[in-house]
């Protein structure tokens, strides 16, 4: 494959181990020897370790993972599907989660205390999830309390958030949502009579705005943007009182890079192209696209598309490349040439996976993810509320 210059630069930074490193922020080490990426036996070593562990091991692979990792996944899916898959395998002692940190936390919350969840590289965080910390949310809630609106505000947090955020949400009457059920979660939060109260939606402003405006038919003026780095969120008390949806100032560093110009450009370049994007994209991009939906929706849409159809897809590059390979009878292109892989997701590579598996064969658990009991119990409440959402919006 040919890399564009930004992709090549990012790839080089990854290979050199440079760029932002959430691992140092989390104050954790990665014990054990990391095999060399040039070791020609890596694939065989992963196979042998996996065979030795048998049913005691369950490997989960997120759709955005590298090919070299995804080939060893027992199941693939989006973050919520994988967490549920993990919960459905109580016989597995070890859940190796090839994804990012918040996903492994969710798996730990939904699995039994006996099971151990492992993230092959603790530096695999999510920039969006990192845009909302537990302390920032506590401070924001104090602002809403001072303004007198906390009592009528329901927090809804996207699956892509830390366990601390999910725990706060569960303890304050709110629910988790995914990109598949955000509309149902918002309707549930507002209640049967429509939006009399408010929703605090975090951490992805774009998913919140797209859902509020396109699915609930609220206006852009009904939504305000709360900046956790500004006093009072950068909003006046009146703006907070008037808003129906308070959006957290967070976004995905991958999907947030697509622009409406990208859509115009691909339409000019490929006549008849269908533009299909993820709702983490900016509102103007979603408005310009033909189809919008979750990762699973994107996969199903392309599976069902007629032979000969042409698609420009605005989501993570690893997934788009695999979808293009899977549908040789259709033309599937990436929406924008300079948007890169999810760099944190790509930290899970074959050397890290091999180290995790071989450590488990030796009886050593490296990089286990555990969520503190009280946080996990409250987060579970928020997750259970999502599972109980009505099936029709
Ligand atoms: S693609 Fe975006 S939301 Fe998903 S893990 Fe990467 S940064 Fe986070």
Image (tube, rainbow, N blue to C red):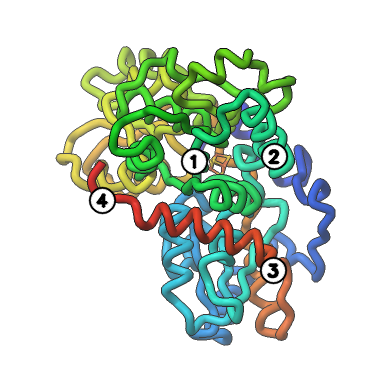
**Label 2 Cα neighbours within 10 Å, binned few <14 / some 14-19 / many ≥20:** few
Pointer 1 or 2: first along the chain: 2
Q: Residue at x 65, y 59 (%)?
A: 375
Disc 3, disc 4: CB below 8 Å? no
**Residue most toward the left?**
306
- Judging by the rendered image, the residue that carries numbered circle 3 is 368
In this rendering, does residue 40 appear at all?
no
Of discs 1 and 3, which sits in the foreground? 1
- Judging by the rendered image, the residue that carries numbered circle 2 is 138
**Picture coordinates of residue 37 (x, y %)?**
69, 59
- Judging by the rendered image, the residue that carries numbered circle 4 is 391
Query: Looking at the image, is 149 positioned above or below residue 223?
Result: below
Measured Cα–Cα span from mark 1 to mark 3: 28 Å
Q: Is residue 303 left or right of residue 53?
A: left
What mark, if any, has residue 156 been given in the picture?
A: 1
Secondary structure, mark 2, is helix
Of discs 3 and 4, which sits in the foreground? 4
**Label 4 Cα neighbours within 10 Å, binned few <14 / some 14-19 / many ≥20:** few
Q: Nearer the viewer, residue 42 or 120?
A: 120
Disc 4, disc 2: CB below 8 Å? no
């Amino acid at each position: 494959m040919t890399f564009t210059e930004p992709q090549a630069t990012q790839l080089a930074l990854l290979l050199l181990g440079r760029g932002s490193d959430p691992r140092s922020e989390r104050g954790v080490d990665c014990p054990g020897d990391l095999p060399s990426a040039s070791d020609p036996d890596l694939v065989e070593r992963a196979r042998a370790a996996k065979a030795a562990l048998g049913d005691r091991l369950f490997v989960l692979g997120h759709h955005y993972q590298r090919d070299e990792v995804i080939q060893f996944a027992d199941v693939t899916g989006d973050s919520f599907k994988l967490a549920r898959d993990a919960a459905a395998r109580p016989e597995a002692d070890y859940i190796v989660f090839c994804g990012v940190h918040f996903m492994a936390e969710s798996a730990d919350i939904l699995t039994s205390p006996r099971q151990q969840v492992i993230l092959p590289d603790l530096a695999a965080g999510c920039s969006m999830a990192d845009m909302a910390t537990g302390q920032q949310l506590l401070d924001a809630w104090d602002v809403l309390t001072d303004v007198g609106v906390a009592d009528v505000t329901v927090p809804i947090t996207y699956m892509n958030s830390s366990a601390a955020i999910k725990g706060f949400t569960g303890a304050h009457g709110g629910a988790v949502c995914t990109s598949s059920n955000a509309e149902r979660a918002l309707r549930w939060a507002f209640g049967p009579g429509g939006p009399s109260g408010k929703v605090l939606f975090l951490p992805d402003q774009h998913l919140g705005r797209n859902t509020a405006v396109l699915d609930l038919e609220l206006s852009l003026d009904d939504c305000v943007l709360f900046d956790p780095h500004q006093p009072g969120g950068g909003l006046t008390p009146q703006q907070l009182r008037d808003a129906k949806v308070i959006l957290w100032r967070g976004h995905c560093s991958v999907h947030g890079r697509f622009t409406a110009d990208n859509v115009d450009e691909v339409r000019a370049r490929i006549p008849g192209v269908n533009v299909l994007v993820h709702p983490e994209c900016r509102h103007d991009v979603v408005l310009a696209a033909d189809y919008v939906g979750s990762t699973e929706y994107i996969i199903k849409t392309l599976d069902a598309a007629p032979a000969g159809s042409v698609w420009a897809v605005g989501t993570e590059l690893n997934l788009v490349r695999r979808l293009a390979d899977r549908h040789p009878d259709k033309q599937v292109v990436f929406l924008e040439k300079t948007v890169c892989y999810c760099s944190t997701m790509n930290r899970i590579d074959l050397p890290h996976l091999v180290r995790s598996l071989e450590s488990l064969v030796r009886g050593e658990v490296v990089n286990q993810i555990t969520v503190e009991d009280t946080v996990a119990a409250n987060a579970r409440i928020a997750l259970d509320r999502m599972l109980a959402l009505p099936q029709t919006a």
